[in-house]
Image (cartoon, rainbow, N blue to C red):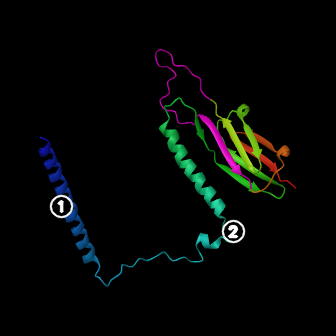
Amino acid sequence: MQKSIITIIAVILFIALAIQTYMFFQLKNQVSQMTSVNEVPSFQLPKMTLDDEFMKNDNWNPYQEMQRMQNEMEQVFGDSFSRFHLNSKSILTKAPRFDLKEEPERYLVTLDIPGGEPSSLNVSIEDRQLSISIKTEHSNEQKDDKGANQYYRQERFSGTYQRSILLPGPVKQSAMTSQYKNGVLTIILPKAS
């Protein structure tokens, strides 16, 4: 019994090895037919001209580029995570989009936070790291026995918005002001002298 099992496994392995060898030689023949021994395949790289946006920008900042890519990845993964847990009762966290503007005397940070609960707003600064969190309003509707008040579709974000932003320079923490109006949070940070 044991010898027959070993024999069957050996035959299967031999057949798999034979198929792989055949495929390897077929691939080798196809490659050799496409290019002769003396020919090297040529690839045309895109030509960069002075009209390209990258070449025009003398003030390219790799830190800003990394921050932009991080924001885009957070948005992609945050959205897919939110969609995956639409029916979940757990609290979700999302990073809001923001604008950071430098003015001569201050920095201005503007964040899109729709549905935020102003009483739950928490803004803090440690060194140059600005941290923001705010909870959204949660619906406490109860279903009755007949299923009334049941959602057919619920896409609006319900959870906590959190974001940490590295500021370009030092600020006066005590002079910081914030305003939350119409789903937009505006934070004014006077520069340190």
Which residue is at 74% across, 45% downward? 186
Which residue is at 59% across, 34% downward? 158
* Left or right of 132 on screen, residue 36: left
Q: Is the residue 51 above or below the residue 179 in the image?
A: below
- Single out the mark in the foreground, 2 or 1: 1
Q: Pointer 2 and pointer 1: residues touching (CB < 8 Å)? A: no
Based on the picture, tell me whether residue 89 belongs to the magenta stretch: no
Q: Residue furthest top?
A: 145
Q: Residue furthest right?
A: 193
Residue at disc 1, secondary structure: helix
Q: Is the residue 50 above or below the residue 130 in the image?
A: below
* Left or right of 118 on screen, residue 148: left
* Left or right of 11 on screen, residue 158: right
Q: Position of residue 10 (x, y in %)?
A: 17, 52
Q: Which residues are magenta?
A: 138-167
Quick one: quadrant of the C terminus?
A: bottom right
Which residue is at 49% across, 75% downward? 46
Sequence-earlier tag: 2 or 1: 1
Quick one: quadrant of the N terminus?
A: top left
* Residue with the mark numbered 2: 59
Q: Is the residue 171 above or below the residue 58 in the image?
A: above
What type of secondary structure mainly makes up the magenta span?
A: loop
* Residue with the mark numbered 1: 18
Distance between the alpha carbons at the discs numbered 2 and 1: 59 Å
